[in-house]
């Protein structure tokens, strides 16, 4: 089963650097990165830049439309006002089927701000005791996850500050 996690980094480059490490770890078969997207919000910019990497395993994962709608709900709807917000509300209902509800959207929106970045990761098969050392010393925070409470606690213990 794949897990969708969102990681926040204290710099605009942090999420991309973490994804690069995860790609290297996937070559060692320590994690399967099925899909990923990076949000980078440089200081002084009014909105973040987003980049969807698409399927990283050669198998269908999440589409660009999924990432585009999700990022629209999180980062852009507040700027466009109620008319667009109402139209996006219908799409938000579909996301809730996958654990992406209003709380998820609000939490990501409040934590991923100017000067930070976030990695949205769909992954499976992580060998935690081998992956954790690669991220030692990197300031990152698990913002959101669709994992069980036990899995999330273990992940926070392994990767927490």
Image (cartoon, rainbow, N blue to C red):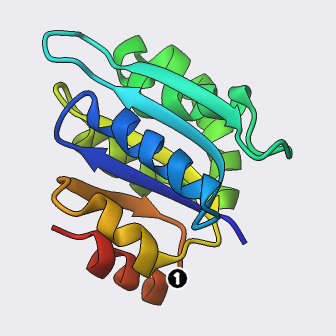
Q: Against 125, is 32 above or below?
A: above
Does 18 sit left or right of 97 as displayed?
A: left
Q: Quadrant of the N terminus?
A: bottom right
> Percent from the top left, x then y, of residue 156?
31, 75
Farthest-out residue, bottom: 150
Which residue is label 1 attached to?
Answer: 148
Q: In the image, what residue occupies the spot 59% across and 64% down?
A: 31
Q: Quadrant of the C terminus?
A: bottom left
Name which quarter of the figure residue 142 lies in: bottom left
**Mark count:** 1
> Percent from the top left, x then y, of residue 42?
22, 18
Q: Nearer the viewer, residue 110 or 56?
A: 56
Q: Nearer the viewer, residue 136 or 53?
A: 136
Does 71 sit left or right of 135 as displayed?
A: right
Q: In the image, what residue occupies the spot 22% across and 10% down?
A: 45
> How dense is the environment of label 1, judged by Cα within 10 Å: few (below 14), some, or many (20 and up)?
few
Q: Please, what secondary structure does the residue beneath circle 1 have?
A: loop
> Percent from the top left, x then y, of residue 154?
38, 84
Name which quarter of the figure residue 88 lies in: top right
Q: Nearer the viewer, residue 9 or 30?
A: 30
Name which quarter of the figure residue 82 lies in: top left
Q: In the image, what residue occupies the spot 42% across and 12% down?
A: 80
């Amino acid at each position: 089963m794949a897990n969708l996690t969102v990681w926040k980094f204290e710099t605009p480059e942090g999420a991309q650097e973490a994804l690069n490490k995860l790609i290297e770890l996937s070559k060692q078969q320590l994690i399967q990165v099925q899909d990923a997207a990076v949000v980078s919000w440089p200081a002084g910019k009014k909105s973040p830049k987003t980049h969807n990497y698409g399927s990283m395993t050669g198998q269908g994962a999440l589409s660009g439309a999924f990432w585009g709608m999700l990022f629209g709900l999180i980062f852009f709807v507040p700027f466009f006002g109620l008319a667009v917000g109402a139209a996006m509300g219908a799409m938000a209902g579909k996301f809730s089927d996958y654990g992406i509800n209003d709380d998820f959207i609000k939490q990501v929106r409040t934590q991923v701000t100017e000067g930070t970045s976030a990695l949205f990761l769909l992954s499976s098969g992580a060998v935690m005791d081998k992956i954790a050392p690669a991220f030692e010393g990197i300031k990152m925070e698990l913002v959101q996850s669709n994992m069980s409470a036990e899995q999330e606690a273990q992940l926070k213990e392994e990767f927490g500050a």
